[in-house]
Image (cartoon, rainbow, N blue to C red):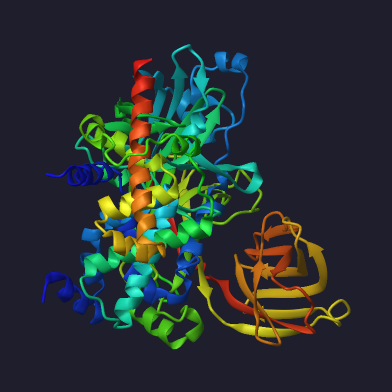
Amino acid sequence: MNNDDELLLKCRNGSKEAFYELVSPYLEKAYRIAFAILRSHYDAEDAVQNSLLETYHSIKENREIRHFAAWFHRLVVHRAIDLARKNGKEKHHADITGVLAFLPDRRDLPIDELIHKEGENDLATCILKLDMKYRMVIVLHYYFDLKISEIAELLNIKEGTVKSRLFQARSLLYQYYQKEQKEELR
Amino acid sequence: MKHDDLFKQEVKTSLDHIKVPESIFSFAKELPYKMEEKPSCLSNRSKWRQWTTAAAVTLAVGVSAGTYISPTFAAYIQSFFTRPELDNGLQAAAKQGFSEKTNAAVTDQGITLKVKEVMADANRLILTYSLEKENGGYIDPTILFNSEQQLLGRTEYFVKDFNTFYITDEDGNIVSRSINYMTKEGKDVTQYIQSVFPHEHYADLMFLLDADKNAKQLFANIRLNKIGIVQGKWNLKVPIHIEKSATATKNVPIHQRYTTKDGISITLQNIVHSPTLTAVHIETKWTETGMQRNKMQREYSDGNGSYFYRPVFDILDSKGNVVATTESSSANDPKRPLFIETNSYDPRTTTPIQWNYSFLPLSKGEKLTFAFRGIKRIEFPNKAVTIDLAKLKKHPVSLSYKDNNITIRNFKWEKNQKGERVGVLDMEETTAETIDLGVSDSQQKQYILHTKDPLLVTDARYNPDTMMYHIKSRLEIEGMDKAPSSLTLTIKSATVLYKDADWKINIVQ
């Protein structure tokens, strides 16, 4: 029995402290996933809090939970997506539509340049600038480590669509990066 | 390493820089306790939150919002804190020379954050800041906050963008009291700022301090990540000299105890007179007898073993006049003496609760008397009455619980603020503070009621002798598209006043 399983058992047996011990190591990542998807601190807070409530209920109702960390983070992703759909407030970044039409039709975009020259926080900023459908796949694939097939299942889209969105998302990130470089040189 | 793996690593590192609010951790920590406390209410507002939020909202009315003052007038005043719209405690302290000018400033992204003036004593701290552009122009200082309109035209400000403001002592300990708010959108906000008063190009930030920590030196800490849409880094740590105000501060230890008829042990700990405030510290705790009685009375508990109460008292001068009170003479009276109340309330525990009441400065030399008046507690009677809507106009319907009473006089259709057709009940209530109502039709369908919305309150009066409010208001019944023949109205909870005037203490100064 690993530590999470032990804490789960303690929770089920009524220990209130055990709940916090169980979830706290995973809260930072949970919040960051939610924030990266929702692009709003308030909504991210809501998504994580709703997930915590659901987690608590699931534990108290003795539902089977295997691999708690993965289960919990996946729940947060679901709740963040639910919230994003519910809000329906996602605003398209002004540049996106224009940029897409002019993307070069090749698969070997110079993403390495982005990696090496882009500052860490600037990359986060660029990711957050992405439209929801692109941002979502970037976060799920590169931050949450989901496979293409898993993302397809989660978002209820075809694997080909996930691949295409990932490609477009990377392309857009590069475009943003180039644009910012030009602005800096002005 | 493949370039995709490298990219993954970069994405992880970059997103790991997103700051995570402490509120997530507090929520997780409190969740199991709250769930036991009132499982059905967590998605909305739990009772204790309503209680504390209501207290915060109603009791903070004494703080007036900043208003515009002309540059001409500004030039005449030596201190920002002598402005007439600030409370008398701040004005008096500033006039006595307790404030100091500073030149603290930090610039980033072409914006300069300046702290212009500070004033502090053992109980609170106020500072004035501005945001200035390179061309000498000013940025609206309230750009750092989200705001909401409250009662009486007051505006409440909430921190945003992870900008932080707090006060520390010489050892780096935070000594500003954190305040929890629930916004109208239902968001919980925790911040150290008690109030924001904008004025012309400036804004004042006011903090309540923990006087018991006896800080020798204070520092105002401001850490900004974002000003409007501009990201950057503006960090300031401004030292504040408090020797002068510390000398002028007097701690009067009291430590006298009384047990109420309800079985609550109350200790008046001490009173701290400082230049800007007089703070009264009280500790309360349920006795064994009190807890036994609680368990025997079903209506005392919210059903989950939580009990809600607060002490009620006055402070009298040598002539017997009330110079400070926990109660309001009128909900609309901006001069009422209770300035602010904070507490460590946890309705489920039997551990002592610390109550801190702050009043505008009371006379240090005069003989004062602490006069206990009783306990207000929230009870859960679940008492119901059925209303025949057709007969209502001729036969008003009343429902009472202890000293609380409601009378429904009329039902009609109106449009609400969103232009939706809603049923409206005309109601008169007599209450010690609040009555929480539920409404359902003969099919047991529950409706959402909007009670005591300030925009709908037509009349509210407070009788200081009976200590009861008399309120005429209208209740909007949301989601009702046709009038049912009858409605059932239920008092879910009500504040009950238990008068207990047997305890008085002469405060030896």
Q: Position of residue B69 (x, y in %)?
A: 61, 23
What residue occupies the far front of the structure in this picture? Answer: A105
Q: Quadrant of the C terminus of chain B?
A: top left
What residue occupies the far right of the structure in this picture? Answer: B394
Q: Position of residue B215 (x, y in %)?
A: 26, 38
Q: Is residue B454 above or below residue B108?
A: below
At 22% from the left edge and 38% from the top edge, which residue is drawn? B172
Using the image as rendered, state which of residue B433 and residue B314 is in the foreground.
Answer: B433
- Left or right: residue B85 versus residue B203 is right
How many numbered marks are there? Answer: 0
Residue B163 visible somewhere in the drawing: no
- Left or right: residue B84 versus residue B254 is right
Q: Position of residue B141 (x, y in %)?
A: 49, 28
Q: Is residue B185 above or below residue A103?
A: below
- Left or right: residue B291 versus residue A12 is right
Q: Quadrant of the N terminus of chain B?
A: top left
Using the image as rendered, state which of residue B410 and residue B342 is in the foreground.
Answer: B410
Q: Position of residue B157 (x, y in %)?
A: 50, 41
Residue B118 visible somewhere in the drawing: yes
At 77% from the left edge and 80% from the top edge, which residue is drawn? B397
What residue occupies the far top of the structure in this picture? Answer: B135
